[in-house]
Image: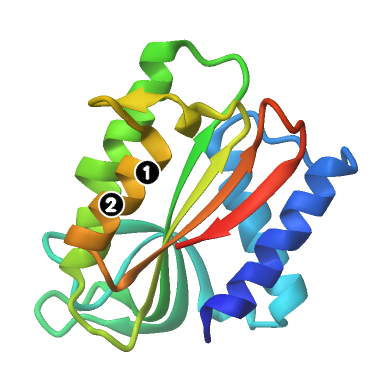
Amino acid sequence: MNIDEILNVIKVIVKNREDGIFVPILESDLHGYIYHKILKILKISTSKVHIDSRVLGAPNNTKYDIVIGEVRFRSEDKRPAIKSEVLMEVKIFPKGFASGQLWRRFDQVINKDIPKLVAVTDTSILKIEFIYDEVDYLSGKHQKTKRLDYLCNYKQRKAPNVHLAIVRKDKYLKDWQILVK
């Protein structure tokens, strides 16, 4: 699996949002829709697509938002975990959230999601931080730097093997943009 295949799924999600077919309110809406679209577009067996799951090679029973891979059983405790091909963490910046809620989400991307993806050291796994920004929150400032630039610089320094897939509604252009870094 490669980033272009996941990008095709993201493009369909954006098109469905533009057409009013899909309107996420919470992150769980986005998780479910990504799951559905992965199954439909990539034609992957339902036994290989998982939400909020443990993966082999991750520390301390860490769970990931979306995982594509085969179910296995861990040798140490016989609990199910995924031998992952794709790991995805998802963050949504939706309409109607207060600035403090949006800030917490941004902070979680930097201090929780990306480090979680980096913690799995298998370089054959496609790792993606998917950000869905409906309010153009990433255009604002963090430490005197545009949040989007800060995030991209942070990713480059700390997580070069993690892809950022960002969908954002530009508040000036009024259209959706898809960025992959």
Residue at numbered disc 2? 153
Q: CA distance from mark 1 to mark 2?
A: 6 Å
Q: Position of residue 136 (x, y in %)?
A: 57, 30
Contact? badges 1 and 2 (CB < 8 Å): yes
- Is residue 138 depicted above or below 180 in this figure? above
Q: Nearer the viewer, residue 147 or 159?
A: 147
**Which residue is at a point 70% across and 80% down the rendered structure image?**
42
**Which residue is at a point 30% across and 41% down the rendered structure image?**
150
Q: Position of residue 95 (x, y in %)?
A: 62, 21
- Is residue 24 depicted above or below 63 in this figure? above
* Image quadrant in which you'd find residue 164: bottom left
Amino acid carrying label 1: it is: Asp
Query: For this view, does 4 lie left or right of residue 66?
Result: right
Q: Position of residue 171 (x, y in %)?
A: 67, 26
Amino acid carrying label 2: it is: Asn
Q: Nearer the viewer, residue 144 or 7?
A: 144
- Single out the residue that lies furthest toward the right: 19
**Which residue is at a point 26% across and 85% down the rendered structure image?**
123
Answer few, some or many: residues within 10 Å of disc 1's Cα (few below 14, many 20 plus, some between 14 and 19): some
Residue at numbered disc 1? 149
- Is residue 158 depicted above or below 101 in this figure? below
